[in-house]
Image (tube, rainbow, N blue to C red):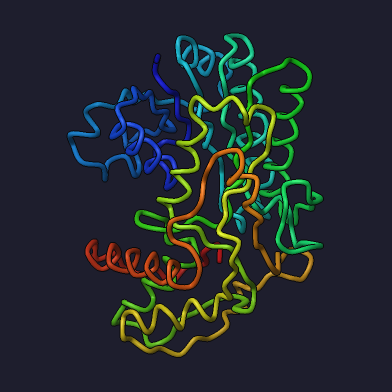
Amino acid sequence: MKKIFVTGSEGFLGSHLVEKLIRKGYSVKALVLYNSFNKWGLLERLPKKILNEIEIVTGDIRDNDLMDRYIKNTSMIFHLAALIGIPYSFIAPKSYLETNTYGTLNILNAAKKYNIKVIHTSTSEVYGSPIKIPIKEDHRLFPQSPYAASKTAADQIAMAFYNSFNLPITIIRPFNTFGPRQSLRAVIPTIITQTLDKSIGLIKLGNVNTTRDFCFVDDTINGFLKTINNNKIIGETINLGTGKEFKIKNIAKLIGKITKIEKKIITDSKRIRNKNREVIRLCSSNKKAQKLLNWKPKYLGLSGFKHAVKLTVDWYKANNLKSKNKLYNI
């Protein structure tokens, strides 16, 4: 097999995916967003033995000609590159459209030219606050942020390329993935680091009554791996979630029990979104993933979630990451 091209390789999901691909013997070309500091993001946290086996290229998915050059002579594309911070999308929506929507279009155009299979990464945020739980893949799309709108548009363009040009494409729609190496802008890492930070006595959160379907990163990546050499999934959209939802306030309590550090939780008004922006619940149906990918989360139910959170807490402890008193996407 020729090299697998991974966009967004320096991010949370991307770095885990690249690592697993290398460990399984695949040849990988990893796209890192060009920066003047010559930083490779979270790829730099991989063992040197793994890192040395990756062909790392720099660039920007908004550059059509460059994407064409990188994608040529590859066998498959895992497209994960995106701007993901929801709060920033409210003040800079154009940036999200340019990267998430038009950047995806560049990837699709190159894939069409060379007839390369694409696994396009969506987000559960495209569903918005659901009409019915659990959320199936045919649920209406109701984006409640510019971020979600840009990803919805990208999904629609991807399916249009499948329908119009018979491009072999699959949309993978992860629910809230968490685990080691995740940015502190996400809710579980920010709770963990605020809990562990001895310099603060309170945990600041937004709406603690929202619920999310949290999937451990190992399970999510396993779902991506099961798309390789799988022709049953062409033209399909597939959720990756556990089918179980947890309230944010209960996660904070769980982390307090795991760390044996009890802190008062307070509401930070700066983290509260108005009702039109706030997605209240997210909980997936993963029956399609079970059927087409033969995929089932290993960290399932309350016991599985507790185990996964414990592994995540242990990683943040070991890496001594400190909380930052900033507004994160929670």
Where's residue 97, x and y in %?
Answer: 68, 38
Residue in view at x 71 percent, y 54 percent: 145
Where's residue 153, x and y in %?
Answer: 74, 37
Return the residue nearer the eye: 213 or 58: 213
Left/right of residue 74 with respect to residue 134 in the rendered view: left
| Above or below, 165 relative to 5 | above
Where's residue 199, x and y in %?
Answer: 30, 82
Residue in view at x 65 percent, y 52 percent: 124
Where's residue 137, x and y in %?
Answer: 72, 47
Tag count in the figure?
A: 0
Left/right of residue 5 with respect to residue 166 in the rendered view: left
Quarter the C terminus occupies: bottom right
Quarter the N terminus occupies: top left
Return the residue nearer the eye: 329 or 138: 138
| Above or below, 146 relative to 49 | below
Residue in view at x 43 percent, y 40 percent: 14
Return the residue nearer the eye: 94 or 280: 280
| Above or below, 188 relative to 140 | below
